[in-house]
Each structure stands twice: as structure tokens, then as C-alpha cells.
Amino acid sequence: MNSPNPFVEIVELKGLSIRFILKNSNTAFANALRRIMISEVPVMAISDFAIINNTSPIFDEILVHRLSLIPLTTDLDGFNLPEKCVCKGIGCSRCQVTLILNVKAGDSPVTVYSRDIVSSDPRVIPINGDFPIAKLSAGDEILIEMYARLGRGKDNARFQPVSACAYKYFPRIVINTSSCVKCTNNGILKCVSECPKGVLDVNVETGYPYLRDPLNCSLCKACVDVCEYNAIELKPDDTSFIFYVESTGSLPLHKIIYTAATILAEKCDEFLSKIGGFR
Amino acid sequence: MYPIRCFTCGAPIGDKFEKFKKLVDSGMPVNKAFEELRITRYCCRRMLLTHVEYIDDIVELDMLYMKKKYKR
């Protein structure tokens, strides 16, 4: 229990994707964080529809499915989850946003885009106006009233704030210098040339191989297999994890990770309070 | 119509199909177009590569036949 506190080291933050290392942690925590990011961080999505008019060649069900999958920008502090709202899930301005899609085609076909959706709340709008929703032939009309609410990824994929969300172990490599003979193949160390990811390199001073790019090592152990002298040891470090998280755009990445950690803490508190009598 | 999200990972890709088509039609190699649109995983790439867009044909048919039959 005296292990140092876990901390996060951001390696790369590029647009909607982040790569970070979670250090001084363990598999249980890393996996809990990953699962909560996927299935428990609430996000806004359209979930109820009132189709008033749809004469387009796209069926109502398909239209509704497409509309529901469009990611909406989310303000987590401004809205409540419907089941936790004061209105008890009936739908009020604190847990629900109304959006209207009203498009009418003239004499030629028209493509309906997500930019045509009019929201009653400027905080909740489609992340991007370029999503094609439907195509109308001449004279067709679409008039739909939509209700967006917060939801969780475990209920429906539309409420998932992340697309790719994964972690892997941090690699630790140990070279046994007493048994390594620096065997070469065409002038390159055998283990270095064998690595399919090209993450091993030769230390210029000592001549021994070393792990130049640990983030891209996939722990395939090709270098261990090719070594005839058992001089390389490659092991996953089960206290450090390389995370890769990609947001769908509805929530910023730091908010997703922070909210996931908060939800995990709340769950732990709830658990402790429930077993409180046994402590 | 082109799907809004990748079937496998759930990344929003619906907005990228028209851009992708424009880039590829202008003569850009497919892998360059993927880099340009920042589509890195092969699940999202196959969505763009294998999609057959036939909504325009449906709209055309709709214009030809449906409108005569059901006057709306």
C-alpha cells in the first residue's frame, strides 16, 4: 500500500487523439479507467424523435438511426443525466435539448447535412456540419423534432465519447552483457535487424542493443527468439501503461479522462460506504 | 448512404466521404488521401474503400416513378 501515487505523462496530444503513459499504477486501475471511458462517461446524443413529415427515399428508421449517431458537442456541467434530474427523466431544460431538422427540396435533389439541424441550445450542436444525413428528390420534405439527452455508452453506442480507447504494457528490456556476444548479420546486430517495429538500436558507446523507442514496441519478442545466447530479456512492466484514446469530438480528451477518473472515485466511495460496517 | 460512424470503432467518418471522393477523383493516391483526412486505422479505411454509393440512383428512380404514382 506504500507504492507512490500514480501519475500521467502525456506523450502526444494531436487533435482528437492522445497518447499518455500511466505510471505507478496497476492493471486493475488501468482497465477500470479504460472501461469507464468507453461505457460510463456521459455524452449528449439524440435519443427521441418525432417524425412529423418524411417523404424522402430514406426510411424513417434509417433516418433516425443516422441522426442518432451524429456526435453532439456536450456540456457536462450544464446538463443532468435524465435519471438523476429533478424532473425524474420526464424531460426538462436541465436534461434535454430540442433540435429541429426542417429541409424542403425544390425542383432538384438536395442533400441534407448535419448543418441543417437547428438546436434550441447553442451548447449542443453537431460537432461537424458536414455529415450527410439524407438525400431528397424534388419536392421532398423532412420535418423532424429531436430530443437530445445525456446517456452512457453502456446503453447505446451513440453515447460513447471515445472511438479507439486502448492500453498496452510499457516494455522493459534487459540486456545481459556477460552473455551477449554482439552477434551480427550483414554488419547489423541480429536482434536489431530482427525487430519488425524497428524500435531497437545499437548503443554507440557500448555496442550493445537498447530500446530506442519503447512506445512503439509491441512486445512481440522477436529479438528474444533470435538471440541464441539468451542475453535479451523483454518483459511487460505491469506498473506502467501506454494509453491511446481517441475522442469522437463531443467531449475534449482531458474532460473524458478526468470524468472517467471522477466516476471511478465515486464508485469506490459508494462501495466503501456500502461495506462500511465491515471495515 | 455513407454510414455516419465506423462500424468497428465508432469513429465519426460520415463527414469524410465526400472529401475523400473529391481527393481521389482529383488523382490523389488512396493512401495519401487517408493521410490527408487523418484516417489511420484499417477499420475506418475499409469503410471508405469498400463503400458503394447508390443513393443517387435511388433518388433518380424516386424522381422518375414514385412522384407520378403518389402525388404528395
Image (spheres, rainbow, N blue to C red):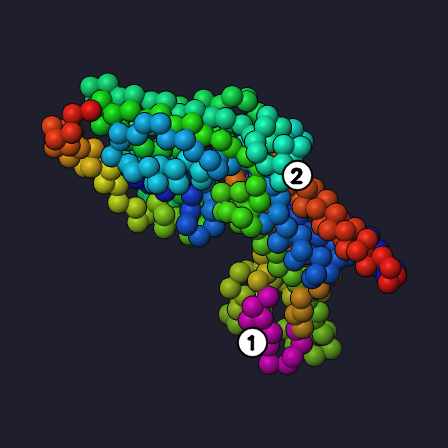
Q: CA distance from mark 1 to mark 2?
A: 58 Å
Q: Nearer the viewer, residue A129 or A24?
A: A129
Picture layout, residue A278 above or below residue A42: below
Q: Residue at x 85, y 57 (%)?
A: A276
Q: Say whether residue A9 is visible.
A: no
| Residue bearing the label numbered 1 | A226
Q: Residue at x 23, y 40 (%)?
A: B54
Dot 2: chain letter: A
Q: Residue at x 67, y 46 (%)?
A: A260
> As shown in the figure, which amino acid type bears the numbered disc 2?
Lys
Dot 1: chain letter: A
Q: Report crowding for label 2: few under 14, some 14 to 19, many 20 or more residues within 10 A (C-alpha).
A: few
Q: Position of residue A275 (x, y in %)?
A: 81, 59
A179 drawn magenta = no
Q: Which residues are magenta?
A: A219-232
Q: Quadrant of residue A122?
A: top right
A230 drawn magenta = yes
Q: Position of residue A200 (x, y in %)?
A: 60, 62
> As shown in the figure, which amino acid type bears the numbered disc 1?
Val
Q: Quadrant of residue B34?
A: top left
Q: Classify mark 1: helix, strand or loop.
A: helix
Q: Is residue A145 left or right of residue A103?
A: right
Q: Position of residue A51 (x, y in %)?
A: 37, 31
Q: Quadrant of residue B69?
A: top left
The numbered mark, 1 or 2, whose residue comes first in the sequence reads 2
Q: Nearer the viewer, residue A246 or A63?
A: A63
Image quarter (top left, top right, bottom left or bottom right) of the N terminus of chain A: bottom right
Q: Position of residue A274 (x, y in %)?
A: 79, 56
- Say if mark 1 contacts mark 2, CB within 8 Å: no
> Which label is found at residue A84?
2
